[in-house]
Image (cartoon, rainbow, N blue to C red):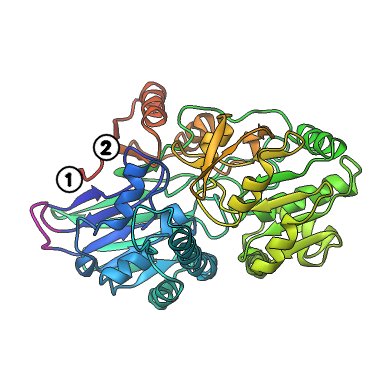
Amino acid sequence: MAYIQFLGAAGTVTGSKHLINTGDPSGKSGFQVLIDCGLFQGPKEWRERNWRDTPVPAREIDAIVLTHAHLDHCGWIPRLVKEGFRGPIYATPPTIDLCGIILPDSGHLQEEDARYYNKTKKSKHDPALPLYTFDEAQNSLQYFKPVHVGQDVPLSPDLSFRFVRAAHILGSCMAEVSLGANGQTRRLLFTGDIGRVRDHKIAPGKVVHSGPAEGETADLVVMESTYGNRTHPKEDPMPELAGLITAAARRGGTVVVPAFAIERTQKFVFILKHLMESGQMPRLPVFCDSPMAIKAVEIFLKHDEEYSDETRDMIRTYGSPLQWPGFTFALTPEESKQINATVMPAVIISSSGMVTGGRILHHLAQRLPDPRNLVLFIGFQAPGTRGFAIKSKSDEVKIFGDYVPIRAQIAALEQFSDHADPPELLEWLHTFRNRPATTYLVHGEPDASRQLRDLIEKDLGWNVQIAQYLEKVEVR
């Protein structure tokens, strides 16, 4: 009997890994494919699982189908290859291009962190080691295979898949899997992360196509629930954004924006450019401090087939961000240190988006204690992350082994999220052409998954279950 096993993003919002086995739940007797292979982030109990071998030996996994290029969906691939995985990794061309910068950068940052902890002796481990290195991440890229949206890909005699648009980030897709079981074909839908049904006034700056693909047919759905317990604000965030930045600048402060290097940063720089050109905020120096920033912009400009109309209009009007006066993209550590020497009001955009690592830590360690500054969150902060602690307005936060007092102004604009909220998810689910036998909720905190389950059951009458870590469910 074929089954699905939840190896990650079950009971938490990170570490997406869902195994399909065409054989028997008691052991490997069929083809095994992993949908996504992400890093665990947040609380220590989850992060520690990044260091454990997969419950299913890496060498026994035959293929990976990757929905998109965020670290919580792709960031464990180099580790899986390090453990012995040698199969193909299927992804869209934009996803492959983005992984080509994200994964090596992740390895580089982990090496940097290990060197720092070994130098300062602030780690409990001696020596502190990276989960994987830059070279190991680079090595994993050889296994990626491009698949275009809508292309049917056979994996085994009993298994095939195709990608349909998820509208989350550049290249993001859901995986429609066709599985032969008991003489019948079952369709499984793995949503990955689901993009918003867009209204540019309340969800501005959308880069890729609006709305997930409609009219789905599925016997079993594995669906994200990140925003299952909250609804995005409906107000236009532009006036508030301009007001927050203007107020910080008037008091001599700097605005620090933790932002995911992929899509969120590109979206945000276009919005800042528009606000400055339209006179809604003062012209301030803008620093994008991420080794990935220049390459990410180049990838976005390359894949114009992914653009929304709004993005085409912005690029037509303003051109490439890499050539805008007053916008600096810091590539080297030396350029990053020069930003820290900046005393004038400015905007600093840096990753990681949840403040789990990267150059954002240096900027926050320097600027959190000063009440003139503003820390502005424009993305989801998973419980247990530094970003969550700062957004929750804790008195202090631990950075590089030291406790840093939080005196800066803290603000968050939820409209910039690229995750669909409950009304948007229901709008999409209502377009299904059938009622799935079971829908399993993943990639959400327990309360978010519970509330979304109750809402779907009440509104649609579907059978909805919350996936449990390591749980196996048969595909009948």
Reading the image, the residue beneath label 2 is 437
Assess whether residue 26 is covered by the magenta stretch. yes
Q: Residue furthest right?
A: 279
In the structure shown, which secondary structural element does the residue marked by tag 1 occupy? loop
Q: Position of residue 232 (x, y in %)?
A: 59, 31
Q: Is residue 465 above or below residue 113?
A: above
Residue at the location (62% across, 34% down)?
406
Among the two numbered marks 2 and 1 on one chain, the one whose residue lies closer to the N terminus: 2
Left or right: where 419 falls relative to 45: right
Q: Amino acid at mark 2?
A: Ala
Q: Quadrant of residue 296?
A: bottom right
Residue at the location (12% across, 51% down)?
25
Q: Nearer the viewer, residue 410 or 311?
A: 410
Q: Nearer the viewer, residue 115 or 237?
A: 115
Q: Nearer the viewer, residue 120 or 460?
A: 120
Residue at the location (66% across, 35% down)?
413
Assess whether residue 355 is covered by the magenta stretch. no
Q: Position of residue 11 (x, y in %)?
A: 33, 37
Q: Are marks 2 and 1 in contact (CB under 8 Å)?
A: yes
Q: Is residue 103 above or below residue 73?
A: below
User: Is residue 189 something that shows in the picture?
Assistant: yes
> Badge 2, how many Cα within 10 Å: few under 14, some, many 20+?
few
Reading the image, the residue beneath label 1 is 476
Residue at the location (52% across, 27% down)?
230
Left or right: where 163 falls relative to 420: left
Secondary structure mostly taken by the magenta-highlighted segment of the chain: loop
Magenta stretch in the rendered image: 23-29
